[in-house]
Amino acid sequence: MERLRDGVVALSLGLVIGGVWARPLLAQQVSSGTVAPGSIALESDPEKGSLNKAERLEWFRDQGFGLFIHWGVDGQLGVVISHSLVGASKEYTDRYFSELPQTFDPDQFRPLDWARLAKLAGVRYVMFTTKHHSGFAMWDTATTPFGVMHTPFHRDITKEVFDAFRSQGIATGVYYSPDDFWWLHQHGIRIERAVPAVQPKSNPEFMKYDQEQIRELLTKYGKIDALFLDGDATGLRDLAWKIDPNIIVTRGAIKTPELTVPGMPMPGAWETCMTMGTAWQYQPQNEHYKSGGELIRLLVETRAKGGNLLLNVGPKPNGELPIEEEERLREIAEWMFVNSDAIYAVRPWVITNEGNIWFTKKKDSSALYATVESDAPWPRATWKEFVLHSVKATDKTQVSVLGQSDEVVEYHPEIVPKTTWHQEKDGLHIRALAAQRLQDNFRWPNPVVLKITNAEPALAPPRVQTVSAAASGQGEVFTGDVLDMGDQSALQVGFEYRSIAGEDANSRNAVWVATPIQTVTKIGQFTTTVSGLDTKGTYEFRAVIQHPLLTLYGAEVRTKR
């Protein structure tokens, strides 16, 4: 909550008015909530049997920001990439496979323009859709005629993309779908996804086909840093590690949620995949883009929770990026040019955030970054005061604002914009001024980052674990477990749940529904019964614990039916 006081804008965190939370302070612990025995995880553990090297995963975590590129033969239609074939009529399917490739001719395709923009935006790796579920190959392959070399364009797009991004120092990644609707169609198999009968592991000839394509992609195009297997990775990820033991398999070996950021940090390397709008591929109508500010905030939140953000673009049929996507990448570029120190080679702090202030720390603990979000711009030449309740200063602590010298404000010689701070019992008090002029209207709308060196944690947050769900005569009984009370004698606990029926294994669109809260005064299990759930439905739930400053979550667990 912001208020004016003696001409200074002050920020107060954690206010409780009349027993009601004035502003939810969403923060998550680094190691809360493991899936208990007998519970069903949201998806099978992708890390089981993984041969990803620890040092390579550490490198991957340091990168922080990747660019996803979804592009296929149906981009000219403005439809969802590939999925329009599921349930399509014979006439539609025949036109798709026989006529559509003849319309693919992106005469404005200039991948070096993409790569230069990506580098400016702070992108460290690219993930390119070499083959989506339709089966259309975006590279020069000997395995199928359904590909870019059999179109009027007749150029190896994958090679040109990888050459361009490598020239800008950006690591390369192959997105590959083990599903292949063209292969199913050629073999008289109904086009579907997520059905065992249509998976490569159920069809030896299909598996051989996929494996040969993986060999081409990982041997013909130089060093490939990462592989994203958007489907059953059986028989493919091990082949990739055999070809290159240093390759990182992302989806198929680490957690890769899409269209959502988890409510809690997950251990190790993980990556959230996010669209700029609602669609993965170019969609000229029925599209709504997130603002540049929203995308920056998603990047900040993801990094605060220890993950990488893989942000998607979908080129137009002529090969250009839509202007909406270019504009947003340029807005991110301006922010990253100032604040990228808070994004690269960072790990979670003891908590992810205090209200609208998000934390990351250098993995060597040399600096803590507090990224200050606000619904309104922080006007230039205006002071703000903050209390960081989770931070304790030492005699070596220094505080500054990233990007500025703290020495001068243009056109305001009377102001000395020196950041000051002092430690109190309730936390680290900081007074700072936004001095740098980044845009003509003097009102930079995106987050400002405070850099704090040689600081220590000032609190021990509580910990909660999501345990299980079980059906009863009254409904679904959710069980959680308070593992640690932290620094509190009493805490409020409860659950959140949402329907995931019809969702992709990695994608989430439904909103969380909160159960009534209860008060606990000691560690141990607690339960809540929820009635009215569809007995044939599929849900996931998580335990919730409220600290006076923080709301923390257990792991997201699927209900057992």
Image (tube, rainbow, N blue to C red):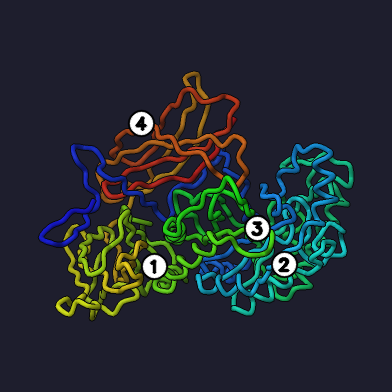
Residues at discs 1 and 3 in contact (Cβ within 8 Å): no
Q: Amino acid at mark 1?
A: Lys
Residue drawn at x 22%, y 47% is 15
Q: Amino acid at mark 4?
A: Pro
Residue topped by disc 1 = 361
Q: Which mark is residue 516?
A: 4
Q: Amino acid at mark 2?
A: Asp
Q: CA distance from mark 1 to mark 4?
A: 34 Å
Q: Secondary structure at mark 4?
A: loop
Of pointers 2 and 3, the one earlier in the residue sequence = 3
Q: Can you say whether 408 is above or below 5 in the image? A: below
Q: CA distance from mark 1 to mark 3?
A: 32 Å
Judge by depth and name the residue closer to the eye, 469 or 230: 230
The image shows residue 79 at horizontal and vertical percentages of 67, 47
Q: CA distance from mark 2 to mark 1?
A: 45 Å
471 left or right of 383 in image: right
139 left or right of 525 in image: right
Residue drawn at x 39%, y 34% is 526
193 left or right of 5 in image: right
Residue topped by disc 2 = 107
Q: Amino acid at mark 3?
A: His
Q: Mark 4 or 2, which is nearer the eye?
A: 2
Q: Can you say whether 449 is above or below 302 in the image? A: below
Quarter in which the C terminus is drawn: top right
